[in-house]
Image: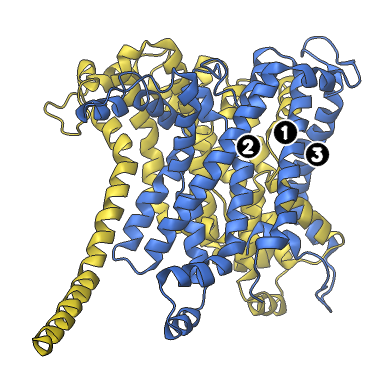
Amino acid sequence: MTTETLPRTVTARRGAAVSWARIRPLVIHVLLAGSALVMLYPVIWMVVSSLRPGNEIFRDPGILVKDLRIENYRAGWNALTEPFTRYLLNSAVVVLGSILGNLVSCSMAAYAFARLEFIGKKFWFAIMLLSIMLPIHVVIVPQYILFSHAGWINTVLPLIVPKLLATDAFFVFLMVQFIRGIPRELDEAARIDGCGKASIFLRIILPLMVPALATTTIFTFIWTWNDFFSQLIYLTDPHMYTVPVALRSFVDATSESSWGSMFAMSVVSLVPVFLAFLVGQRFLIKGIATTGIK
Amino acid sequence: MSALGELGSLRGKKPAGQKKDNLAGYLFLAPWLLGLFLITIGPMVASLYLSFTDYNLIQAPQWIGLENFTRMLADERLHNSLKVTFTYVFVSVPLQLAIALLLAVVLDRGVRGMAFYRSVFYLPSLLGSSVAIAILWRQVFGTEGLLNQVLALAGIEGKGWISDPSTALGTLVVLNVWTFGSPMVIFLAGLRQIPTMYYEAASVDGAGVLARFFRITLPLLTPIIFFNLVLQIIHAFQSFTQAFVVSGGSGGPSDSTMFFTLYLYDRGFGNFDMGYASAMAWFLLVIIGVFTAANFFASKYWVFYDD
């Protein structure tokens, strides 16, 4: 009897081990897919709700649309003092200006830090790193006073000019890291061919740092598009509202019964972020992995 | 590696034998330097000055010495906002990092479709700070919100999570935890750098999954954990949008979501009490500075550098 049962238990155990090894990936996938669904469910539900008649939003936690309606979009688009197009355009101006500013000024500073030797470089570099961690609140009050004396309140200037002056130091750091990875021999060769600092920067470094520039572009796009605090402070005239400020005033202006149009406009405001994410995923992931920017 | 690591390693070693190019260096640095002085240091000095004044934007600032600071000592709403902010930071950051680490470890084990999951988990980090998501949160945790609808399916009666002072802050904690994707990506990058031979050696020695995690992964990952911790704490202290939108700008109900930054906004831009707001801003800087310094100090005891 014992001689018979022993091999059986062994095979049984082996069988169990094999099947666990087999189902383990499956279990992990189910858990991962489950948590992914839980995470994204509210967002998916918001998109679906934006396509539903208002009274159904409160009744249905599901995400199947029975009859698809776009009234919420039409209503939301015109619910505020200006049509939503206006806010989208304002946001676009701020975003494009910020991208241009960051690309030009941060790449210049990064080139200086990564490739040039000058007195006080380490000091300035340390200051640059520290400025990454500085809370905006410490400077916002005097900045506001400064810009209001300049007559810049309710213009896009307070939102764009700082970017032209490389105040987003994360990107300087990101680009420094990237330039350090470009072989110095290339600079040397160009120098021997008679290139000065400026043309080495323009002809050698800039073309090679396109991935870093792309990362900067996409992050600037998403952050500026989402930025609320500074846009709330500087843009108080409804004509100048950007998308986040307009959305926020939606919350105040409308009763909770118009969740449908509020969601519709929320979805509209998230579309550019989502597209930027789809296009720039690779750069975004690389960007945070190397510098830890949000 | 990171900005933090870089800052620590700045001392010493000069690259020898390179010709100085001071003029070119400063020319390329000019926009940044201009920004540093005009947009950062100048306003910092001004804000330090204003913190000792009474200033409402219309009349000239009046020097009142330490009065703003003594007022802060007696300001109950400020004390409450500190309590709210600290609770938020201390609860949401560890939770967020723990989940980020857990999922990074799971994903790093060569799960199929890793890139897909990574993207899905990362997406909320990009959306999380937007007004749209804050609006969504208001609905999800509202009386007739999505959460209560789902709970009703299970026969549980929910409540107005946002209108109840005891749970309102919790909804914001959930929102912050939800954005665990960006620390997760940093963890994933860190996990990639652990040599596989360590694991192979441990397997040969008969170490199980847990032993390998606690003896190899965790110690070797401490620099990354430290980096994420410092970053997320600094970040969480400055949270604003979510609380502002979810509470309808009021920090309510009964100041239960009145973050320090929200109160600062309320003083400075709601009541044009610019002197007091400046004093608060400096206090915030000191708090963040103390926390960061304390983190660096404590890191000597738990962060392990493998070199």
Looking at the picture, which amino acid does disc 3 mark? Ile
The CA span between labels 2 and 1 is 8 Å
The label shown at residue B237 is 2
Residue A73 drawn above or below residue A191: above
Q: Is residue A111 visible?
A: no
Locate residue B48, reporting x and y percent. Answer: 84, 30
Residue on which the image places disc 3: B41
Looking at the picture, which amino acid does disc 2 mark? Phe
Q: Secondary structure at mark 1?
A: helix
Locate residue A145, reporting x and y percent. Answer: 75, 22
The quadrant of the image that shows the N terminus of chain B is bottom right
Mark 3 burial class by Cα count in 10 Å: few <14, some 14-19, many 20+: some
The chain that hosts pointer 3 is B
The label shown at residue B284 is 1
Q: Are marks 3 and 1 in contact (CB under 8 Å)?
A: no
Q: Choose the circle earlier in sequence order: 2 or 1.
A: 2
Q: Are marks 2 and 1 in contact (CB under 8 Å)?
A: yes
The CA span between labels 3 and 1 is 17 Å
Locate residue A90, reporting x and y percent. Answer: 49, 27
Looking at the picture, which amino acid does disc 1 mark? Leu
Q: Choose the circle earlier in sequence order: 3 or 1.
A: 3
Tell me: B303 left or right of A125. Answer: left
Q: Secondary structure at mark 2?
A: helix
